[in-house]
Image (cartoon, rainbow, N blue to C red):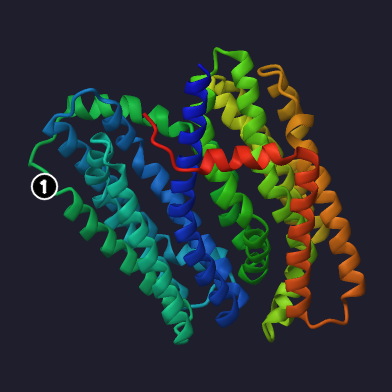
Amino acid sequence: MDEEISQIKRRGVLSAGSLFFQSSFSAVLGFIAFFILTIKSGTYLLGIYNTVLAMMSFFSYFTNLGLAAAIIQKPEIKKEDLSTAFYIQLFLSVAAIIVGFFLTDYLFKFYKDLPANAVYLYWGLLASFFFLSLKTIPSVLLEKKIKIYKVVVVQMIENTVFYLSVIIFSLLGYDIYSLLIAVLARSITGVVLIYFMQPWVPSFTFSWQSAKSLLSYGIPFQGNSFLALIKDDLLIIYLGGVIGFRQLGIVVFAKKYAEFSIRLIMDNLSRVAFPIFSRFQKDKIILKKSVEKILLYQSIILFPAIVGAMFVFPSVLKVIPGYFDKWNVAVFSFYFFSLSAFFVSLYSPFINLFNAIGKVKTSLLFMVLWTTLTWALVPLFNRLFGFNGISMAFFVMSLTFIFVILTAKKTADFSLLNSYRSPLLATFVMALFLFISTIFGARLNNLIFLVLSIGGGALIYGFVIYLDRGRRFFEELLALVRFKKIK
């Protein structure tokens, strides 16, 4: 059993490493593109782009209907199943595009500060939606054959084309048209590559029986993500019309920077933790240890990243000429989004735990709670405090981490002290150092201050972790990441 646990731990770390590389590649390019957009374009552009993407997610939800999942779960796939799914997807996509096109005028009535040339970006995204529908069946076939790596390769190339297009054309001064070019280039590249990886041609067949079978599974499956759609994408669509694109751009800027670390680290660890929790769900002792290890590894990275960023963020903005003057209005929201991200990192692994051990209803109840709070608090706080109130609302919602932890404790009697003691202690000492350095380093050059603060903070953090956990902890980390043959 010990050897099995050791192998699973190493597999988990290796999986996390590969996922981290794949996601970090796109994340770095995406961050560069986002960064250049924030320099070269107006604040309104970020608001416009995120609103249009949210609209496309909304369209995509109601045209997908879980067809991909329905095909993957079938033991045997017939040609008529694939063709039927393809034509259903094509019909729904074309219908959504037509509806979207006729909603163009209403778009300008609801979003009063929408510039006239934004319509081309909207139409471009509608066109890209059509290309996206063409990718479904080849992608499903690759996943069914357990050749997911090919899908990943296509996604990486798509993202590279998209972000490089944004970077290049933004630098050339194309403004909103850089996004239009990037969207179309990504869509066409994705379709060509996926059909190269998995050639497939639909037959001229359509089976009503097959359609009924696919939809009977796909629609309930798709329903699981309905609350997430209401909570996230519909909120962006609403805010774009209520607070305007300029203020939405400021909110997006603050949220993007504040949540960068949790999106990069936490999302990857969650994908690795799910099968580990699922495997040991019947062994309470091993499940307890697994939960504690996941919490420790995640918090030991995220705590200093989130807290450290709160101290150095204003100096980061000041390093680039004119950047602070343009985006200093987002600093207040950045602080509250950062606090929210900190508390989200505390409860997110437990939602993963609930899903892994079959307590989906528990995670669903929390999703209902957060969706309700989102639509109750965000409009209220926006009315009371302006656009800065949005980040404050997210912070208040994140305080529900207490209820998640109390519920999780009934499932696996883990020790929060074992997991969080060292990261919290080291983060507190690091924060104290950064606070003092901020006071006494105010007259230093911003770049010099950043180097000294980040370098000094990292050394102090690592030293406190070493004092508290001992050499054995670092040896354990090295043993996990050391490449060994896994049977």
| Crowd around label 1: few <14 · some 14–19 · many ≥20 (10 Å) | few
Q: Position of residue 238 (x, y in %)?
A: 60, 55
Of 238 and 447, nearer the camera is 447
Task: Classify 340 as above or below 244.
Answer: above
Question: In the image, residue 398 lies at what x, y percent?
Answer: 74, 42
The residue wearing badge 1 is: 201
Quadrant of the rendered image containing residue 333: bottom right
Q: Which of the two residues, 106 or 306, is positioned nearer the viewer here?
A: 306
Q: Position of residue 339 (x, y in %)?
A: 77, 51
Q: Residue furthest left?
A: 204
Identify which amino acid the numbered label 1 is placed on.
Val
Instruction: Name which residue lies at 54% across and 33% down.
Output: 273
For the C terminus, the image quarter is top left
Q: Residue at x 30, y 37 (%)?
A: 68
Q: Is residue 228 above or below residue 168?
A: above
**Which residue lies at the image location 88% right of the left edge and 57% below the top edge?**
432
Quick check: can you spot residue 292?
Answer: yes
Q: Is residue 484 above or below residue 160?
A: above
Q: How many marks?
A: 1
Q: Is residue 88 visible?
A: no
Identify which residue is drawn at 35% across, 68% down: 161
User: Percent x, y for residue 211?
Assistant: 23, 30
Q: Secondary structure at mark 1?
A: loop
- Classify residue 148 as left or right of residue 392: left
Q: Nearer the viewer, residue 21 or 27?
A: 21
| In this view, 172 is above or below 289 | below
In which image quadrant can residue 212 be found? Answer: top left
Q: Nearer the viewer, residue 137 or 305?
A: 305
